[in-house]
Amino acid sequence: MTLRIINSKLIKLAEYKPKNQNLIIYYQNGEKFEAVNVPVSVFEDLISARDVDNYYLENIKSKY
């Protein structure tokens, strides 16, 4: 498991579980979003994105 503090306007934390390719996004408002079958490269791109919120909305939330 990899847990990364993001602290963007929308996202507080991102957690990735490589065993089952689960990505869990913890929002600033306390809610969470869970996605399955997410390649590790998507998680890596998320945490290194210049605009994390935009990357999440365009590449994760709309696809998983």
Image: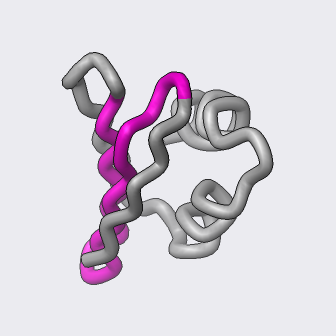
Q: Is residue 25 above or below residue 48?
A: above
**Is residue 16 shown in magenta?**
yes
- Which residue is at a point 73% across and 53% down the rendered structure image? 49
Say which of 39 and 51 sits in front: 51
Quarter holding the N terminus is bottom left
Residue extending farthest to the left is: 30
Query: What are the residue bounds of the magenta stretch?
Result: 9-27
Q: Residue at x 79, y 49 (%)?
A: 50
Q: Main secondary structure of the magenta part?
A: strand
Identify the residue shown where x is 47% and y is 48%. 6
Residue 54 in magenta?
no
Residue 57 point in image, percent of width and height:
62, 28
- Say above or below: 20 vs 59: below
Lateral position of residue 60 relative to residue 26, left or right: right
Q: Quadrant of residue 15?
A: bottom left
* Residue 43 in the image, given as x and y percentages of width and height: 54, 63
Quadrant of the rendered structure where residue 62 is?
A: top right
Q: Pinpoint residue 40: horizontal percent, then vertical percent.
A: 52, 74
- Vertical side of 32 occupied by 49: above or below: below
